[in-house]
Image: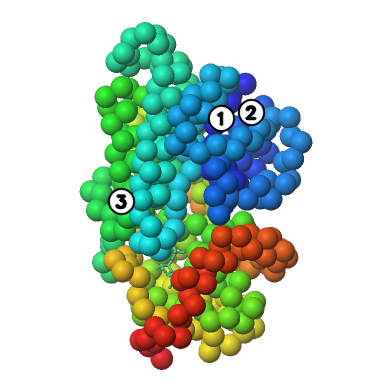
């Protein structure tokens, strides 16, 4: 039996992944560790309550002792590291937690995996590992920086991150790479584009706009709203990670995109129209500092080498996502009643004071 340690499995992408893995691989054990910060929510995992192959442990990935204990008590065969501070705006306000969680947390996991996966634990620089083990680092296309009007991100591009968040993720990628080069630790890195779908915390563009629209609150669009993102349905992202976990070649990086380039304003207007609300709710606000203009992914490597392709069209994915949020209004209320309420007030209470730069 394989035992997969999923970190950050109570978050948006992590919880979708845990749900997928338990359904798709009933012979695997999944250990989910999560610090349950503002973005983690065990409600996302209610459908697997009582599953004998599933275990949840509340732990912060920076906690070396507890991570060691988990490896000591379980024959872990793979780590899939989702645990991260992920919101760019927060990283501009408070960079430190991004650096400690995303970089040091990753290093703690790598050190521990390196210690327990070695064939010969007494050999300090042993490059032989137990067969079949793998460290999979879930990263982001933001590590490449911003694209101009044309071109796509490919895996060989230099890392040029622009926000404290993306700099922390790029740093983590480099640490993972170094453990592969120096110690031979088996690994893959995946770099995804913008995810959307069920259970996404309503600070990110799509759920924020759906939630605000439903409450007829203002819809803050940064700058001119013509920034482009490549939207990937979370379930496609999870099947891609499952594919890389099983078929990815050691030491390789794989981009994962949705083939859906959309401008932010287009997304917001689509949500408004689907929900039958007024475009007057849109408020163009001050731009995000260091705002990346365009992200777009080239999926050629993962498609040709591993045979993965996104299954969702954006039209189908966004329709299902809006329906999910309409059917789960209580989920939103529960999640925003915590820290998010304060954060939201802090970020947007002065919304009328920021210069409306368009319309
Ligand atoms: C929250 C918010 C966002 N935006 C804009 C900023 C971006 O151009 C776009 C999407 O913003 P966000 O939802 O914050 O996502 P973005 O900054 O692209 O980053 C996301 O996508 C990345 C992958 O590309 C992930 O690594 C990040 O963890 C994730 O947060 O919408 C607005 O115009 N208004 C808003 O209120």
Q: Nearer the viewer, residue 236 or 144?
A: 144
Q: Quadrant of the N terminus?
A: top right
Local secondary structure at mark 3: helix
The percent coordinates of residue 77 (x first, y second) are: 52, 24
Drawn side of residue 163 relative to residue 271, left or right: left
- Residue identifier under label 2: 29
| Relative to 237, residue 180 above or below | above
Judge the density around disc 1: few (<14), some (14-19), many (≥20) Cα neighbours within 10 Å: many
The answer to which of marks 2 and 3 sits earlier in the sequence is 2
Residue that appears at 44% across and 58% down: 87
Q: Do callouts 2 and 1 mark residues in contact (Cβ within 8 Å)?
A: yes
The percent coordinates of residue 342 (x first, y second) are: 54, 66
The percent coordinates of residue 287 (x first, y second) are: 35, 75
Q: How is the image coloured?
A: rainbow
Local secondary structure at mark 1: strand
The answer to which of marks 3 and 1 sits earlier in the sequence is 1
Disc 2 versus disc 1: distance between alpha carbons? 6 Å
Local secondary structure at mark 2: strand
Closer to us: mark 2 or mark 3?
3
Residue that appears at 52% across and 69% down: 344
Q: Which mark is residue 4?
A: 1
| Relative to 189, residue 198 above or below | below
The answer to which of marks 2 and 1 sits earlier in the sequence is 1
Residue that appears at 33% across and 9% down: 123
| Relative to 93, residue 20 above or below | above
Judge the density around disc 3: few (<14), some (14-19), many (≥20) Cα neighbours within 10 Å: many
Q: Nearer the viewer, residue 215 or 354?
A: 354
- Residue identifier under label 3: 167
Location of ligand 1 given as a quarter of the image: bottom left
Q: Quadrant of residue 70?
A: top right
- Residue 298 visible (yes or no): no
Disc 2 versus disc 3: distance between alpha carbons? 33 Å
């Amino acid at each position: 039996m394989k035992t997969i340690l999923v970190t950050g499995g109570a978050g948006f992408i992590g919880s979708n992944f845990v749900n997928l893995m338990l359904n798709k691989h009933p012979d695997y054990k999944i250990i989910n560790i999560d610090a349950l910060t503002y973005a983690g929510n065990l409600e996302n995992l209610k459908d697997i309550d009582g599953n004998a192959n599933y275990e949840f442990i509340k732990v912060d990935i920076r906690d070396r002792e507890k991570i060691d204990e988990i490896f000591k008590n379980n024959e872990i065969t793979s780590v899939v590291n989702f645990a991260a501070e992920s919101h760019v705006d927060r990283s501009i306000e408070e960079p430190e937690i991004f650096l400690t969680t995303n970089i040091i947390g990753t290093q703690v996991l790598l050190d521990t995996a390196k210690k327990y996966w070695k064939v010969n634990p007494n050999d300090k620089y042993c490059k032989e590992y137990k067969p079949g083990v793998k460290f999979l680092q879930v990263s982001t296309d933001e590590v490449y920086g911003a694209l101009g009007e044309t071109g796509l991100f490919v895996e060989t591009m230099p890392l040029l991150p622009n926000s404290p968040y993306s700099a922390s993720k790029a740093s983590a990628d480099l640490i993972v790479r170094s453990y592969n080069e120096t110690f031979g630790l088996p690994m893959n890195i995946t770099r995804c584009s913008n995810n959307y779908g069920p259970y996404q915390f309503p600070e990110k563009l799509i759920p924020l706009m759906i939630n605000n629209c439903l409450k007829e609150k203002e819809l803050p669009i940064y700058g001119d709203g013509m920034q482009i993102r490549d939207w990937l349905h979370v379930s496609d992202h999870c099947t891609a990670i499952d594919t890389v976990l099983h078929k990815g070649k050691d030491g390789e990086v794989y981009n994962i995109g949705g083939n859906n380039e959309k401008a932010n304003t287009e997304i917001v207007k689509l949500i408004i129209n689907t929900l039958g609300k007024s475009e007057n709710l849109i408020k163009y606000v001050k731009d995000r500092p260091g705002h990346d203009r365009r992200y777009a992914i080239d999926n050629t490597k993962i498609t040709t080498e591993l045979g993965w392709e996104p299954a969702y069209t954006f039209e189908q994915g966004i329709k299902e996502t809006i329906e999910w949020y309409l059917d789960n209004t209580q989920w939103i209320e529960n999640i925003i009643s915590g820290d998010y309420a304060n954060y939201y007030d802090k970020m947007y209470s002065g919304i009328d004071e920021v210069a409306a730069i368009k319309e």
